[in-house]
Image (tube, rainbow, N blue to C red):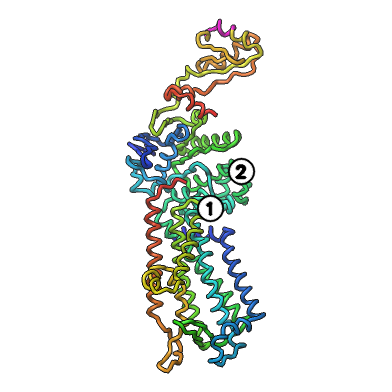
């Protein structure tokens, strides 16, 4: 696999504070690479170094096999980014903004091509509206359109779902998957939401207090046998007794009108059938995020996990 | 680079704030023209009260288009720096404030190019602002008040002087004066850009630019020998009104004005060198600082 981002021994110090401490990672072509960590973990600082917004204190960054510092212009022409908030020129229309940033990349695109870009993010019908009238979700989508306007090979999205409502989050998630699957883009997406990364990323890196904790394939890092399923039924005690006498009797807990059951993810449909066959009125069967448990094991800190899931 | 400059100019053109400067200049010039058209003689009487015993002047001809432009320039070129600071002080800090700076810096051009383009855009804005001022203050005044010889009131040392420039010797002086003013105002633009590099909102650098200009201007106007000798030469504000030198006509041994001459061209040239030096210094520091800056906004 061809490496697109290669980071080695990257450090950034702000006076006495070390924001990024000897971080190494590689992102390969076609990856949706999840960059995970709580607020202040060093994700944004690392991303800003990848985009030359911040000068590293030490370490090396290579993008597309070339040194970033020495080949800045050439490399950045192949990179699109949304960094934290998708701030654009509020006094300009969506089309004007898109056109302006296309020109900054040396492109002169026709109105039709620009409208196609806006259509990709669901804003074609608002092309003539000024950005100051856009909702946060619309700004976020326009920001992504701007990052894509020069057809970059690598897309870097820093907390792209921040401040969005559930529908907005789902829209951005679907867009990322679409860009990866249909357009073959390499995407680095940072988030403090575990569930987010679990759904969209194939590889991930977890940062904690400026250091890399782990990097690898999401599927291999997560043990599918450790999925915790939350169950709510009409008669919780009866359900608990039923499950206590089943094959899942060893990993079951009851609390606050719900049952938590440790089960392999592939067995969830089987559990569902089992309860229905035993005439249990099921209100809810919900697999909890296995990444949460994984992260909890890594950091041994519940407060971190709570900050991720809230 | 040209592409980037076009983009910058487009952004300036589209910003509502840009038109504050043009509206302010238009309003001030129109008020001047209305006031002088209505009651210009009272102003002339006031100005001439110390010298009218020594001169025979046709006051009705003294108020003409050329004179109006001189009066307006004299007043406006003190205020225009504030309008230039509105645009230049916003150049980088405005982008930081909007959050667009981090997008700009991730585009495939250098930070030096970005500062140079911001500077050129501010320079062109200054030129366009001065052209607008020239159209209103000179050409519209000529239409309203007509043409005649230009009378300049000057205080030189302890004596008051009236300089008379024949009407066929005036217009080139205005072109030269506007050219000089463009350089002088570009110093303000450069200072605004320099200060905007260090800020993350527009208000700070705009206010700081205006405060520096006002403070230096006040110091430049303190007529005490120790300040004249030791401080004024170092203040760029001492040279901002150097455009007036183009209207100080040279005289022959008999004290008669020499058509097409300037009293002290060397002083004007040296002032221009100093102003251009300041532009280079301010932009140089801005580029150096911006290249080193971590974009955290």
Locate the C terminus of chain A by quadrant: top right
Residue A16, by quadrant, is: top left
Q: Which span is picked out in magenta?
A: A241-247
Label 1 residue SS: helix
Is residue A245 located in the magenta-colored stretch of the structure?
yes
User: How many marks do you count on the picture?
Assistant: 2
Residue A307 location (% of width, % of height): 51, 29
Above or below: residue A272 compared with residue A165:
above
The residue lying toward the viewer, choosing from A309 and A60, is A309
Tag 1 residue:
A99
- Expressed as whole percent of the image width and height from the top left, the position of residue B225 reads 39, 74
Q: Is residue A47 above or below residue B74?
A: above
**Image point (59%, 7%), residue name:** A242
The earlier-in-sequence mark between 1 and 2 is 1
Q: Is residue A168 left or right of residue B110?
A: right
Q: Residue furthest bottom?
A: B254
Q: Is residue A240 visible?
A: yes
């Amino acid at each position: 696999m061809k490496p697109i981002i290669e980071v080695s021994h990257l450090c950034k110090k702000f006076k006495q504070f070390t924001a990024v401490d000897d971080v190494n990672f590689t992102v390969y072509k076609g990856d949706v690479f999840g960059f995970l960590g709580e607020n202040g973990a060093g994700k944004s600082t690392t991303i800003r170094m990848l985009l030359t917004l911040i000068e590293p204190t030490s370490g090396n960054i290579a993008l597309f096999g070339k040194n970033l510092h020495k080949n800045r212009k050439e490399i950045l022409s192949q990179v699109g980014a949304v960094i934290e908030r998708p701030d654009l020129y509020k006094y300009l229309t969506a089309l004007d903004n898109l056109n302006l940033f296309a020109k900054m990349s040396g492109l002169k695109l026709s109105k039709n091509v620009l409208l196609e870009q806006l259509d990709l993010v669901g804003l074609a019908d608002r092309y003539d509206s000024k950005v100051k009238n856009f909702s946060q979700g619309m700004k976020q989508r326009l920001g992504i359109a701007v990052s894509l306007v020069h057809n970059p090979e690598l897309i870097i999205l820093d907390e792209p779902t921040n401040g969005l409502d559930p529908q907005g989050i789902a829209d951005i998630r679907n867009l990322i998957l679409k860009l990866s699957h249909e357009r073959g883009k390499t995407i680095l997406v940072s988030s403090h939401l575990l569930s987010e990364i679990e759904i969209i990323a194939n590889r991930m890196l977890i940062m904690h207090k400026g250091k890399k904790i782990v990097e690898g394939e999401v599927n291999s890092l997560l043990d599918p046998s450790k999925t915790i399923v939350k169950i709510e039924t009409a008669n919780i005690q009866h359900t608990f007794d039923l499950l206590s006498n089943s094959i899942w009797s060893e990993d079951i807990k009851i609390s606050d009108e719900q049952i938590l059951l440790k089960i392999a993810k592939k067995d969830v449909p089987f559990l569902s059938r089992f309860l229905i066959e035993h005439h249990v009125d099921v209100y809810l069967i919900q697999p909890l995020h296995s990444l949460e448990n994984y992260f909890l094991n890594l950091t041994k800190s519940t407060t971190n996990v709570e900050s991720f899931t809230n | 680079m040209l592409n980037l400059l076009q983009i910058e100019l487009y952004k300036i053109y589209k910003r509502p704030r840009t038109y504050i400067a043009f509206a302010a200049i238009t309003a001030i010039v129109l008020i001047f023209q209305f006031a002088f058209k209505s009651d210009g003689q009272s102003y002339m009487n006031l100005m001439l009260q110390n010298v009218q015993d020594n001169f025979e002047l046709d006051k009705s001809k003294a108020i003409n288009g050329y004179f109006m432009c001189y009066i307006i320039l004299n007043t406006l070129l003190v205020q225009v720096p504030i309008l230039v600071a509105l645009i230049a002080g916003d150049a980088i800090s405005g982008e930081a404030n909007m959050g667009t700076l981090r997008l700009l810096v991730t585009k495939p051009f250098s930070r030096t190019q970005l500062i140079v383009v911001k500077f050129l855009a501010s320079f062109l804005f200054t030129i366009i602002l001065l052209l607008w001022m020239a159209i209103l203050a000179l050409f519209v005044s000529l239409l309203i008040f007509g043409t005649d010889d230009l009378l300049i009131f000057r205080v030189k040392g302890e004596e008051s002087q009236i300089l008379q420039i024949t009407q066929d010797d005036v217009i080139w002086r205005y072109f030269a004066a506007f050219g000089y003013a463009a350089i002088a105002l570009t110093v303000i633009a450069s200072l605004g850009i320099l200060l905007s590099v260090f800020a993350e909102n527009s208000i700070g650098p705009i206010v700081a630019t205006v405060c520096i200009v006002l403070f230096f201007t006040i110091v430049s106007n303190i007529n005490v020998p120790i300040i004249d000798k030791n401080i004024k030469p170092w203040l760029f504000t001492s040279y901002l009104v150097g455009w007036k030198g183009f209207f100080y006509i040279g005289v022959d041994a008999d004290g008669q004005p020499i058509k097409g001459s300037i009293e002290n061209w060397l002083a004007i040239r040296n002032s221009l060198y100093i102003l251009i030096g300041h532009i280079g210094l301010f932009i140089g520091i801005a580029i150096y600082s911006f290249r080193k800056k971590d974009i955290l906004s």
